[in-house]
Image (cartoon, rainbow, N blue to C red):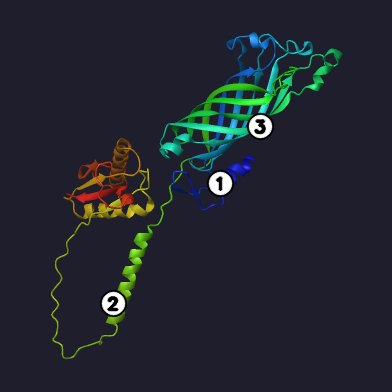
Amino acid sequence: MFALVAFGLSAQEVQNVSNGTVYLRDKASDHWYIGLGGGTNLYFTKAENDAKASYGDRLGWNGQLEIGRWQSPIWGARFVLDAGLIKHVINPLPAKLQGNDHNWGSFHVDLLYNFSNAVVGYNPDRVYSLIPYAGVGYAYGLVDWKKPNDAAGSSLFKNQNQSLTWNAGLINNFQLTKKFGLFIELGARALQGTFDWTENTDYDYDFMLTGVAGLKLGLGGKQEFTPAELMDYNLINDLNSQINRLRAENAELSKRPAGCPDCPDVVVPPPAPEENVYVPNVVLFRINSATIDKNQQISVYNTAEYLKANPNATVKIIAYADKKTGSPAYNLALSEKRAKAVAKALTGEYGIDSSRVSVDWKGDTEQPYAQNDFNRVAIFFAE
């Protein structure tokens, strides 16, 4: 079941998420993580004496090991191994088991849903995420039989200290770096009513609440998702129209005579002195990103070459964010990151002195282009 959930969509070329953004398909080794944590549990049963004990006195311990994978920024799956102790302060177990620890071990497979990414939008730099989960599993009781041949306890064989479980909960995830984070998990599971060896219960199910805190580590490949750069079909159609027009003009020109002996000679003026003319360059960004894509590096390179050829020239970089995505405050911060990323590329990768490069950012307060997607941009201005 875990393999189906984790890899069921891996054959697709791209991954669609509910907010409409399309993400590139990554390697099967990407987006895996492992988690380790410990905490406490509280077991709810029909046992006569157990109900009289305070909640604080009934807290038992448990530990947890998990491995999981995110299939998209919103959906993921995990496999969890956990174990612990059900603590009964006034032990409700039959005489045969009095004084024995009621340990247990279990595993469960869960479907993960990143609520923060689904509602607010994917942000690889987000620190806190709320992640609900639901799944199924199996639990087995590990009771120490001190008197295995005691006839007085023979009735225990009518009960089961193993059970299928139904699991659900909330994970509070704190991502501190790309591959390291902390989590606080609050969970609940339903088990068969006789799992704790109590008899004659009127309840079909017992319930266990768990609280676990721990750390998570990214495994292997990349952890972040990359939005796909989709084609602008309007632009493609426009370019095709221009190509067809030029072909038609060439066809007409080919019908003209190759020479004209009666035409006067044309005097060709000498070429004008060569000048370095700067044409403004732009760097386009993916949605919610301040990373310069490889296909945008040419603009940074051309600007660096212009500055090297004109030692007295300076350049100003102004960055923007599109108005239809994010809040004004978030977009302002995003455009600042974009401007500084481009400036860093000029100075760090191409050796341009930082005194010749200035930056500014406008967020979504200004939209230099009519098409919304084009406003995820940083523009170079020669000064």
Q: Which residue is mark 1?
A: 28
- Give, as a three-letter code, the residue at label 1: Ala
State the CA–CA distance, disc 1 to disc 3. Answer: 25 Å
Q: Position of residue 250 (x, y in %)?
A: 30, 78
Of tags 1 and 3, which is closer to the observer? 3
- Does 312 sit left or right of 106 as displayed? left
Q: Which residue is mark 2?
A: 249
Q: Position of residue 286 (x, y in %)?
A: 37, 48
Secondary structure beneath dot 3 equals strand
Where, quadrant-wise, is the N terminus in this rendering?
A: top right
In the displayed structure, 167 sits above or below 343; it is above
Secondary structure beneath dot 1 equals loop
Q: CB atoms at circles 1 and 2 under 8 Å apart?
A: no
Q: CB atoms at circles 3 and 2 under 8 Å apart?
A: no
Q: Position of residue 140 (x, y in %)?
A: 71, 26
- Give, as a three-letter code, the residue at label 3: Gly
- Does 239 sit left or right of 41 as displayed? left
Seen from the viewer's position, the closer of residues 29 and 15 is 15
The tag earlier along the polypeptide, 1 or 2, is: 1
Q: Which residue is mark 3?
A: 137
Name the outermost residue toward the bottom.
Answer: 262
